[in-house]
Structure formats: structure tokens, C-alpha cells
Amino acid sequence: MDKLYIFGVPIHRVTMIEAVEILKGYLKEDRIHIVATPNAEIIMMAQKDEEYKKILNETDLNVPDGSGVVFASKVFNKPLKERVAGFDLMMEFVKWASHKDVSIYLLGAKPEVVEKAQSNLKNLYPSLKIVGFHHGYFNEKEEENIIEDINKRAAQVLFVALGAPKQEKWIYKNKEKLKVKIAMGVGGSFDVIAGKAKRAPEIYRKLGLEWLYRLIQEPWRYKRMSALPKFAFKVLLSKLRKNNF
């Protein structure tokens, strides 16, 4: 797949349809495939965390999650095809998987959130095969039991909602132990599915202002949100200096 490197983080040039097809293909291969969803915030995290950047360079698929990433590609006249939000990719894949014999495991979020998320997914897609779930508040001693449970239940797909960069680091650390075929970090997706958090209205998403909606809804996130203007400034400064990413 064609990639665009943004400040050392590879982003694959894929559409939503293409990304779903790639995930389907991963199910045919007998090994784990790690899927990440880099946005501007994640790319900025990677600038200060070499371990995280290394992991993002070794994943199998990095979809362009976030209008900031698409903006950066256009500034450098290397436009990505479209934004592929991690939440939307998860839900598109789940919709397809509900018609197939694909086993899914949910890991992460608070106990009541992950339980409600799996319940809502089952209500939405009654034939969806969720073989297990576990909250994200576990210690290292419990970790081995969780991995054993995931493998024992023969999960093919593992959605991990521990937040970035923790979720990608956890997957990468345990990639040799996990017997799943797809492991994907999905951030706060379980909270949205469970109804504990709201996605931005479509008009915000179309205008690339989902970050603004989230800031209005959760003003305490302002420190994390500060990564967005820093990213935009870094992109424009690189352009002015005629540097590549």
C-alpha cells in the first residue's frame, strides 16, 4: 500500500471501503495484524515518544483518522484520499462481520461501559459474534489471564479501547502471545457505542471541526486538544521552510 509519512509516522492512502477490504483480507492470514488510527494528536505524541513512533512504523495498517492529517497532506500537495475515522472503520467492519462467522473480543474502558457497548452492539447486530469482553482497568498480574481468555475464546478480532498510546503499546507488547488475526486500537469508541459519549454531529465532521465539538463538550480536554494547533503550526512552518514532513 502507498504511504504518506507525516513527521515520521506512516499513513496509508486508503478510503473507508479499501480499509474494510484490507481488514477482511487480514482474516485470511494466519498471523496478527495491528491496526492504528493516527490523527494529529497521535502524530504529535509520537514526536516526543520514540517507542510509540517505532510501533506506528511497524503496524500493518495506519488509517488517516482526523481532518488535521488530511489537511497536512493537502498542504504538501500529497493529498490523502479521504479521512477514515477509527470509530467509523470499526463500525463498518462490525456491520460486515455481523453477517459472517467472525469472532470479536472487546477490551478496554470502564467495566460498565464495555458491558453496555457489547450489549448495544448485540442489539444493533443480533447475529454479531462477540465471544468475550473485559474492562481496561487491569494490572500486569491480570494481563496474562486476559490474554489467555482472548485466546481460549478463539477471538479473531480484538478491539482495544485503552486510549493512545497505551492501546497500541499494549497490543505491540503482547503481539507474540495474542492469537487474534486483527488487533485494533479504538480509543473512546466503546464510550460512544455505550451511549456514554456523543460523536460530533455530521456537519462538524464534514467541516473537520469534530475537535471543536469535543472541546465544547469536554473543556477539560483542552491540554490534549492543544496538540491540534501545534500540529497545524508545525505543518505550515515546515511548508514555509520548504522542508518535507
Image (tube, rainbow, N blue to C red):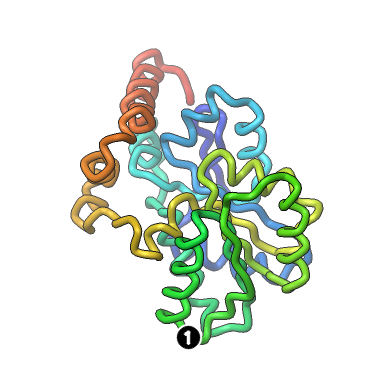
x then y, percent, for residue 71: 33, 37
> Is 98 placed left or right of 236 in the picture?
right
x then y, percent, for residue 205: 26, 52
Residue 15 position by quadrant = bottom left
x then y, percent, for residue 24: 60, 70
Q: Residue at the far right: name it.
A: 176
Picture layout, residue 126 above or below residue 47? below
Foreground of the two, 31 or 186: 186
> Is 124 placed left or right of 155 in the picture?
left
Picture layout, residue 83 above or below residue 228? below
For numbered disc 1, what is the local secondary structure? loop
Q: Which residue is painted at 38% across and 44% down in the image?
A: 66
What crowding class fits label 1: few (fewer than 14 Cα within 10 Å), some (14-19), or many (20 or more)?
few
Residue 129 position by quadrant = bottom right
> Is 32 placed left or right of 109 in the picture?
right
Disc 1 marks a residue whose amino acid type is: Pro
Foreground of the two, 211 or 146: 146
Q: How many marks?
A: 1
Q: Which residue is painted at 54% across and 77% down in the image?
A: 97
Q: Which residue is painted at 54% across and 48% down in the image?
A: 162
Q: Which residue is mark 1?
A: 126
x then y, percent, for residue 133: 59, 66
Q: Which residue is painted at 61% across and 39% down in the image?
A: 56
